[in-house]
Amino acid sequence: MRTTVTRLETGLCLALGALAQLVAASAGAQERNFSIDPPRIERATAQLLEKPTPLGNALVEIVMARGEKLPLQIPIFLERSEVLLRDDGMAGDRTGKDGIYSAILSLDVQALGRNQERVRKLLDRHGKLTMPIYRGRTLVARAALPEDFLVPIRPGVRVPLEWWGFDVGIQSGKSLLIRDLSVVEDPERTYDPCSRTGTPMGKWTFGYLMTQLANPAYTGLDPADFTEQWVETFLSTQIVNGFDVIPRPQFQNLVLDHWPKTPTGQLDLVKAPFKLLAIVNRVDLRGNSVYGGGGNAGEARLVFGFAKCVAGVSTSVAPHLTVILEYGIKKSGCLQVRSWAQQWTALGDLVLGSSQYNDALQAITDQFSLAGAAPSRPNQSALNQLRTNGGMSDAFWQLREFKLTGSGAAISQLLPATVAQTPDSDVMPEFANVFSYPNPNALADYVNAHESSIVADQHTVLLSFGGLPFRGASSSRHGVVYGWNSPLITNREARHKFALQTCNGCHFDETATTMGAQQFFHILPVTNGPAALSGFMTGIDVTDPFDGAPIRHFDELERRAADLDGLVNNQCISSLDTRRLIPVSFAH
């Protein structure tokens, strides 16, 4: 073994000058987009070298799954540099074309050791550790920790590099979905206009955040007018992607008339009738920075519930309505993304709702919520989209999406946009004839044509299909609740996966979010106490709503916790392991 490693070290030093050319050649030959469609991996190991080389301190070997057709060199992006995985028998690769890709690179040995010690403590505490494995949003297995995971790290010994994340390693209520009243009713950062307690225009109030979106110092927009313009889009017909969004004049008396006004008649943003329900970490929505070289850190969200004053008390009332501000987190490369995730994870070491905890959380939210957080985007805001969930009554449901329009740092209003991953309701067979959509079989045609990418959770719903507009202007333009189904869809798993990614599927049939007041909501505003969570968030078994089988298990907080734990504690190269598939097409 020592002779082999020495020969590898010598050959690798000679290869330094040619590395850039090899990366370019490999990239040119590679047509498959690994950031979206990564190769399947059977095993990944690392072996420390006796003596580090200019390329690194460890030999990494990746055993690709059988049947993968891959180029002989695959460029990946780790830490601060590009690395070439090779199966050509050169510069670190033992044998060419054997399906085992190799590279010499730098591993953080101290971090590996700290993670092993952390896992030992988790084992002592829990007795057994398993990693929940999700395909898309569905639990498919629980993998037992391999015995060699805790093998001492030393030269000549192979240690596993597969991705391991444990939901028990993360405190979800502190680091993922924060809804404790000591946080969402923090008097230094929130304000109750009914009892007049808290801080007017505190950092986590709806009025303050809308002011940051308007960014008047840069745009010249009046924040109150900016906000009222957004609400008034509900009062008139909006055309989005060729579909009309039917006006909801009830918003006048349900929302605008309950919104206190200033002496000038403008909306009083200090007294905005929206209560903070939750602050949400969605780093699980990040892009793949290892294969893509750039990536992002997903999203962070603040969820508000509509409320109005009743006898001096802020009370959530029917109709239930939530507004979600969803910000994009622009971080590039594994190190930046991991550092961002570590900020959220570190909250778990603080007392929930303490001044130290809330200060640290605000230090996180300030990075994306403040005006100027994204200088190259509309209004210089990091907002990806604003979504509304709810309706005119609890029997009427509709989800809408709004974006700051414009190119670059243009001055922009919040205008209706297509809803992510969701076709218009008119493409459903039962609605197509009623509302004159030309192709009543459009849903089945579309799913059948894209079934492979849908099943792989790698599909984005197109704006148009078959020469017709397809992606919807709202989740249900007509307020009717329905599920996505057609007997003409041949692959029934594709039917489910497609439906689950839509607003309607995620918030209704596919996740069994169909009962009582919880209907349509994963985070439900309540009159007292913290916001309630759906079974989809906390763990539920759901029978296929149209086929009766199979039974699927969902547990978003478990999935996100295992993902966050893995992201924070694994080496960057471990994210090559597709057992923790980055959900590139997730929207909800």
Image (cartoon, helix red, strand yellow):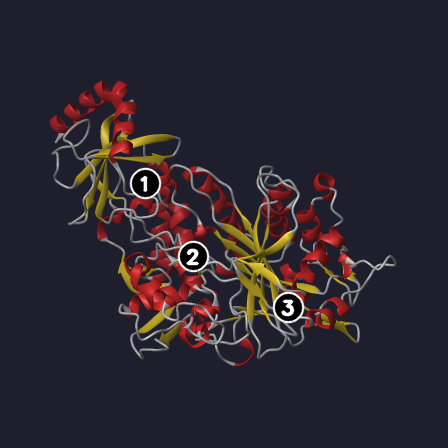
| Side of 162 relative to 98 (left or right) | right
Q: Position of residue 579 (x, y in %)?
A: 29, 53
Q: Quadrant of residue 367?
A: top right
Q: Is residue 504 left or right of residue 62?
A: right
Q: Which residue is mark 3?
A: 247
Q: Are marks 1 and 3 in contact (CB under 8 Å)?
A: no
- The amino acid type of the residue labelled 2 equals Ser
Pointer 2 residue: 464
Q: Earlier in the sequence, mark 2 or mark 1?
A: 2
Disc 1 target residue: 573
Secondary structure, mark 1, is helix
Q: Is residue 559 left or right of residue 323?
A: left
Q: CA distance from mark 1 to mark 3?
A: 50 Å
Q: In which quadrant is the N terminus drawn? A: top left
* Amino acid marked by disc 3: Pro
Asked if the residues shown at circle 3 and circle 2 are in contact, with their CB atoms under 8 angstroms apart, the answer is no
